[in-house]
Amino acid sequence: MSVAIAFGSILAGNYCYAASEPATVAGTYELLACKGTCSFAKPETAFAKGVVVLFNDVMPGKEVERVDPFHSGPPDEKIRACFTGDNLKGGESFIFTQRTGVSSWSSKGKKLEFSLLFAIDAGYNVEATREGEVFSGKGVSWSAPEPPGRGYGPDSIVGRRKGPPDISACASAQLPPVT
């Protein structure tokens, strides 16, 4: 598969929008990323930790700008998520390269997809399976025209719901007030 085809399929798959998402998917989730097995029972295995907030509705423009003033996603992107986190051990991964940002997300059945980095030449996409209030799956770093290094293989991702959607959870630093 050529890089151009892979790049196009990543964009097509991660920026779809479904208006009829079940309300139970929306929420504030803790997230761990590991290079091997990952679980909240052993959080010390995580090289990255963060929060992702999934909203049912599109975020207002002022909130997008407040959380991520430099966001540059696709023009038709329906921004319904925000995130913050740290790559604590400098793991070979693009996860939380951008510590705080916004994204779209989609869900079909038990499948959940969102992005934690989108740039013209690199990104980090999460594909997970939901089971009740938790999800698990993989996070993939990608770049163009060359793929990232060998150690940048898929990361194990786990998330657990902590409550309803709360935009303040996306602030790794004090957010400026809405004006």
Image (cartoon, rainbow, N blue to C red):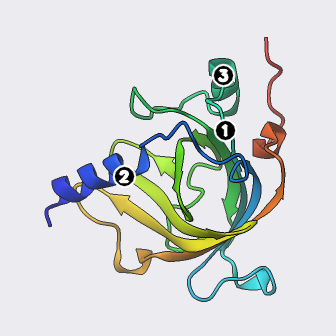
What separation in Å lies between label 3 and label 2 (alpha carbons)?
23 Å
Dot 3: element? loop
Answer with left or right where residue 87 lies relative to residue 165. Answer: left
Residue 135 placement (x, y as % from top left):
65, 69
Residue 123 placement (x, y as % from top left):
43, 53
Residue 124 placement (x, y as % from top left):
47, 58
Q: How many marks?
A: 3
- Mark 3 is on which residue type? Pro
Q: Nearer the viewer, residue 64 or 17?
A: 17
User: To which quarter of the image does residue 49 belong?
Assistant: bottom right
Residue plotted at (81% across, 85% down): 41
- Mark 1 is on which residue type? Asn
Q: Nearer the viewer, residue 44 or 134?
A: 134
Answer with left or right where residue 41 lies relative to residue 109. Answer: right
What separation in Å lies between label 1 and label 3 (alpha carbons)?
12 Å
Check disc 2: other Cα within 10 Å, few if <14, some if 14-19, many if 20+. few
User: To which quarter of the image does residue 43 belong?
Assistant: bottom right
- Mark 2 is on which residue type? Gly
Pair 1/2: label in front = 1
Residue plotted at (63% across, 42% down): 81
> Which quarter of the image is occupied by the C terminus?
top right
One can see residue 114 in this view: no
Q: Which residue is mark 3?
A: 60
Q: Earlier in the sequence, mark 3 or mark 2?
A: 2
Q: Which residue is mark 1?
A: 56
Answer with left or right where residue 30 lies relative to residue 90. Answer: right
Q: Which residue is mark 2?
A: 13
User: To which quarter of the image does residue 3 belong?
Assistant: bottom left
